[in-house]
Image (tube, helix red, strand yellow):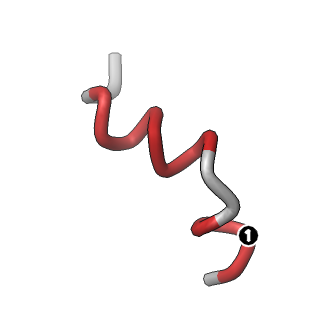
Amino acid sequence: YLPPECFELNRTPLISSK
């Protein structure tokens, strides 16, 4: 189980940008 922060990052294109 991952924290909500990880979930939010996964939802946002931030990871894609990185």
x 38%, y 42%: residue = 6
**Residue closest to the far top:** 1
Q: For this view, does 16 lie left or right of residue 9?
A: right
Q: Position of residue 12 (x, y in %)?
A: 61, 52
Q: Is residue 1 above or below residue 9?
A: above
Instruction: Give the structural element (helix, strand or loop) at label 1.
Output: helix
| Type of the residue with mark 1 | Ser
x 73%, y 69%: residue = 16
Q: Which quadrant holds the N terminus? A: top left
Q: For this view, does 9 lie left or right of residue 11?
A: left
Q: Which quadrant holds the C terminus? A: bottom right
Total marks drawn?
A: 1
x 46%, y 33%: residue = 7
**Residue closest to the far front:** 12
Q: Position of residue 4 (x, y in %)?
A: 31, 28
Residue 14: name its quadrant. Answer: bottom right
Q: Is residue 9 above or below residue 2?
A: below
Q: Is residue 9 above or below residue 11?
A: below
Q: Position of residue 5 (x, y in %)?
A: 30, 40
Local packing at callout 1 (Cα closer than 10 Å; few below 14, some 14-19, many 20+) is: few
Residue receiving disc 1 = 16
x 70%, y 80%: residue = 17
